[in-house]
Image: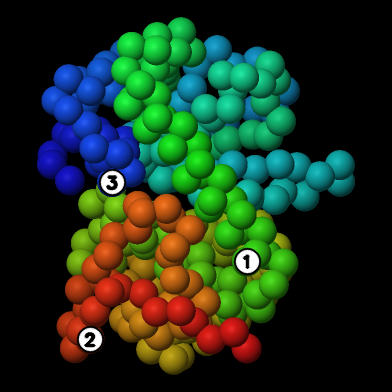
């Protein structure tokens, strides 16, 4: 990604081609940014939002709380995501969004988004395609929670996390920033911290990953994808075709379908 380039542009260009004028319209969506520290709410369940939010940098998550105070993370939000488009149509937010790492969020007034969407059918199509991308990821998370083992869930989350950051050019070779705690990973995968730790240690022991100092390094992409049953089709054409450039491993079309057992 070019220095200073809006990550939303990089992501949406992977989903829809744009003219220079349409790119100008997209970059004019917001005039206000908010800088937040880790573990701060951007929006809360019950809010009546008047703006949509675009993550420019950092990491956030979508989450809900049970009546007895347990948290379920339902999505990780990465730079380039417009993460509450639904607030255009819903009066009240039915979930919360909070930061995981220090983050910069751009606020897009509803009226601005509606006006630009009316002025440019292709921009409107891209914005709603972004919403469909989000829905596809959410469906895959349901499969991950309901039908995969602890080991498979963690491997799948790691593959998706890398792929989504690669889409907006926020990886360094085979490495990506990984600011989550094991508690946050547990809340995202429906596991205990003990199961998360065991699964990470197993992936390390098999030489698939290295995880240290807040950085995830994928040492064997094909092996990790197989371990997590990850093939990337659900990323709707936004998945980068090339596998991570790993030394000693030659990628072909990037991802192979994992085992079903």
Rendered image quadrant of residue 250: bottom left
Residue annotated with mark 2: 249
- Helix, strand or loop at label 1? It is helix
| Residue at figure coordinates x 61%, y 54% from the top left | 139
The x, y position of residue 110, in whole percent, is: 48, 13
N-terminal label among 3 and 1? 3
| Residue at figure coordinates x 53%, y 53% from the top left | 137
In the displayed structure, 105 sits above or below 164; it is above
- Helix, strand or loop at label 2? It is loop
Residue annotated with mark 1: 144
N-terminal label among 2 and 3? 3
| Residue at figure coordinates x 64%, y 34% from the top left | 96
Q: Marks 3 and 1: which is nearer the front?
A: 3
Q: Are marks 1 and 2 in contact (CB under 8 Å)?
A: no
**Horizontal side, residue 48 vs residue 60: left or right:** right
Give the quadrant of the C terminus.
Answer: bottom right
Q: What is the spatial separation of the Cα atoms under label 3 and label 1, in whole angstroms?
A: 25 Å
The x, y position of residue 39, in whole percent, is: 54, 40
Q: Marks 2 and 3: which is nearer the front?
A: 3
The x, y position of residue 30, in whole percent, is: 34, 17
In the image shown, does 201 or 82 lie closer to the viewer?
Answer: 82
Residue 116 in view, yes or no: yes
Residue annotated with mark 3: 14
| Residue at figure coordinates x 39%, y 79% from the top left | 256
Q: Number of numbered discs present? A: 3
- Helix, strand or loop at label 3? It is helix
């Amino acid at each position: 990604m070019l220095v200073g380039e809006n990550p939303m542009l990089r992501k949406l260009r992977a989903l829809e081609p744009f003219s220079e004028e349409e790119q100008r319209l997209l970059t004019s969506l917001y005039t206000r940014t908010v800088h937040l520290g880790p573990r701060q709410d951007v929006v809360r369940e019950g809010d009546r939002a008047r703006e949509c939010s675009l993550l420019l940098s950092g990491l956030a998550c979508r989450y809900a709380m049970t009546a007895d105070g347990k948290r379920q993370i339902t999505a990780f939000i990465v730079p380039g995501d417009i993460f509450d488009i639904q607030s255009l149509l819903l009066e009240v937010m039915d979930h919360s969004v909070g930061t995981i790492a220090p983050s910069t969020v751009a606020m897009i007034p509803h009226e601005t988004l509606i006006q630009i969407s009316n002025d440019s059918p292709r921009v409107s199509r891209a914005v709603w395609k972004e919403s469909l991308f989000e829905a596809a990821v959410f469906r895959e998370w349901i499969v991950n929670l309901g039908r995969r083992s602890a080991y498979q869930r963690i491997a799948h989350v790691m593959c998706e996390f890398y792929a989504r950051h690669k889409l907006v050019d926020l990886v360094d070779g085979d490495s990506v920033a990984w600011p989550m705690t094991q508690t946050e990973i547990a809340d995202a995968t429906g596991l205990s911290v003990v199961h998360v730790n065991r699964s990470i240690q197993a992936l390390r022991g098999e030489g698939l990953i290295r995880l240290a100092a807040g950085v995830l390094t994928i040492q064997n992409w094909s092996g990790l994808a197989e371990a997590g049953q990850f093939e990337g089709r659900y990323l709707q054409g936004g998945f980068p075709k090339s596998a991570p450039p790993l030394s000693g491993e030659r990628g072909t079309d990037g991802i192979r379908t994992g085992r079903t057992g």
